Amino acid sequence: MMHFYSSPGSCGIGIRVLLEEVGARFEAHALNFAAKEQMDAPYRAVNPKGKVPALVRDDGSLLTEFQAIAFWLADAFPDAALVPSDPEGRLRVMEIMDYMVGSVHMRGFTFVIVPGKFTPTPAFQEELVTHGKAQIAIGFATLVDVLGDKDYLMGAFGIPDAALFYMTRWAVEKGVNLPPSLAAHHNRMLSRPAVLRALEGEGIAVRRAA
């Protein structure tokens, strides 16, 4: 059985969605970031990086980083059809995943959610939040173009949608503006049984976008 490590409310909810979608057998382990459990010796023995998400596979090997875990799950459970089979399609999936995680998340939501990580000064924290929201707006505008009039980013549901969902969930939670099509995508995700199971498993309330 695989072991999945995350923190409630983190980007790990996207990986849990994928675990539920493919029907994987796994045991979930929730880390208390407020208590800095991710830096304690027991977890560092599992993942020396001291971050989430992390997945210990059936053979005991560790896999970290959102994109890597998502792609491995898609390849390990091909019947779920979470990535295209052709090289160009897979390339486009990697392209949009890297943009979401590297730019919208790391250069946007990080400053909105944890500005205190960078400075103890309240005024500077406010500036970081403002900067983060501006970067999110740029990223969301790009994702609106990618989504177009499709139900899911690449047409059919796939691993990029799990990444987008964890960000739209943050947007709803933090009061960040969601363009209408991304709000519709968020609510569409909430109609998927796997998403509801993932939220329940993480102890996260179901919150629809306005």
Image: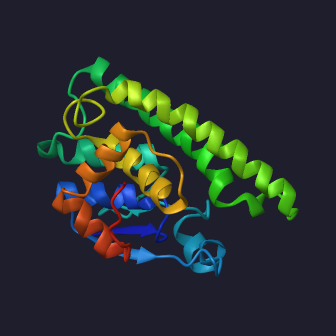
Q: Position of residue 57 (x, y in %)?
A: 34, 61
Given residues 179 and 108, the one toward you in this image is 179
Q: Position of residue 13 (x, y in %)?
A: 39, 61
From where the camera sits, is residue 104 visible? Answer: yes
The image shows residue 67, relative to residue 125, as above or below, that is above
**Farthest residue, direction top:** 88
Instruction: Identify the residue shown where x is 22% and y is 40%.
Output: 157
Instruction: Identify the residue shown where x is 34% and y is 37%.
Output: 181
Given residues 17 and 207, the one toward you in this image is 207
Quadrant where the C terminus is found in the figure: bottom left
39 vs 125, left or right, is: left
92 vs 82, left or right, is: right
The image shows residue 108, relative to residue 148, as above or below, that is below
Given residues 186 and 154, the one toward you in this image is 186
Given residues 162 and 82, the one toward you in this image is 162
Quadrant where the N terminus is found in the figure: bottom left
**Farthest residue, direction left:** 79
Q: Position of residue 6 (x, y in %)?
A: 46, 67
Residue 161 picture quarter: top left
